[in-house]
Image (cartoon, rainbow, N blue to C red):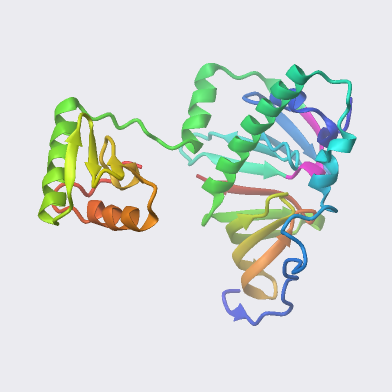
Amino acid sequence: MLQWSDRSPQQWREFVNQEVCVTARDQQRFEGRVFTVDPVSASVVLVSFLEHECPSVKVILGHAVTDVQILASGTEETERRMKSLFLPDRTQVLSKEELKSRRENLHLWLEKNRVPVTEDGDVLRVASVLTISAPYGTGDCSCANEIILARVQSLVESIPGTEHTSLS
Amino acid sequence: MKTPVSVLRLPRGPDPNSRGFDPNSPRFIALCPTTLSSSSSGRADEEEQRLRSDLRERFLRTLLSMTDKQVEFNMHEKVRVRARFGASDIDVLNFQVSDLETPLGVQREALLRSQDVISCSFEL
């Protein structure tokens, strides 16, 4: 078998989501589930879920890895659990009525601030250059002009009322 | 252990004459087109590239979740130091950290060479 850092991405991919034991150069052993192997440095990222403790993550640098042994394979459930730790949590789903009321509140707030805004189906269009899509948060504004974007974003952020929850 | 110490040595800055990437960096040499085998088909390259980007994206997300967290660095000769992780460079050759706790005191800002680090661990 080739040295760890010389293996191909396909070979590294085989280890993802498996429970492994990584042996490092100074004979230390690390156990955990592989989240990823960095293709640039061959570093292994291990995740361990311990009872009654926060999940811990270990990154073992590629140059220090001497051996990786698979202890147990993972399932879709373990993959999903790992992914949820790192990937942004966009699971807050708002109902149609909530989205409608958010949109209308934002529409009124922008008009109050003398910003020309029209509703176009599910999105709000500001001066026909900026679009605000659901769920109408600060991160949902898109515009080609930086200055207009910044101005409108600060307005959206400062909307009074129950809009203080961040959705991003 | 908590008294900050004055800077002992400034790190080397980026090369002022280049455009930013270093043709002698290990990454460039490893991925330089002249070293890729010419016999592999286009389809296999695409698949490999897709795997590489998938693995790299996950790694970048790991680094992202590591920022501003207390990280323990496991280095050679059983040296363990704690610091607040700042950033890594593109080739994962250096780590920028803050409040590095060393036996000499707390270094407010420091650069760790990744060749000196064996592993780092943190809690989410």
Q: Is residue A100 above or below residue A18?
A: below
Q: Quadrant of the C terminus of chain A?
A: top left
- Which residue is more in the foreground, B98 or A94? A94
Residue farthest front in this picture: A128
Residue occupying the point 73% across, 31% down? A21
Relative side of A93 to B64, left or right: left
Image coordinates for residue A157, horizontal then vertical, percent: 25, 53
- Which residue is more in the foreground, A143 or B36? A143
Q: Is residue A6 above or below residue B77?
A: above
Residue occupying the point 65% across, 82% down? B6
**Picture quadrant of residue A94:** top left
Stretch of the chain drawn in magenta? A61-68
Q: Is residue A67 above or below residue B22?
A: above
Q: Is residue B22 visible?
A: yes
Q: Quadrant of the N terminus of chain A?
A: top right
- Which residue is more in the foreground, A9 or B105? A9
Relative side of A13 to B60, left or right: right
Q: Is residue A129 above or below residue B22?
A: above
| Total number of numbered discs in the rendering | 0
**Picture quadrant of residue A24:** top right
Q: Is residue A14 visible?
A: no
Image coordinates for residue B16, horizontal then vertical, percent: 74, 69
Task: Tell me if residue A50 is in the magenta stretch.
Answer: no
Image coordinates for residue A144, horizontal then vertical, percent: 39, 48
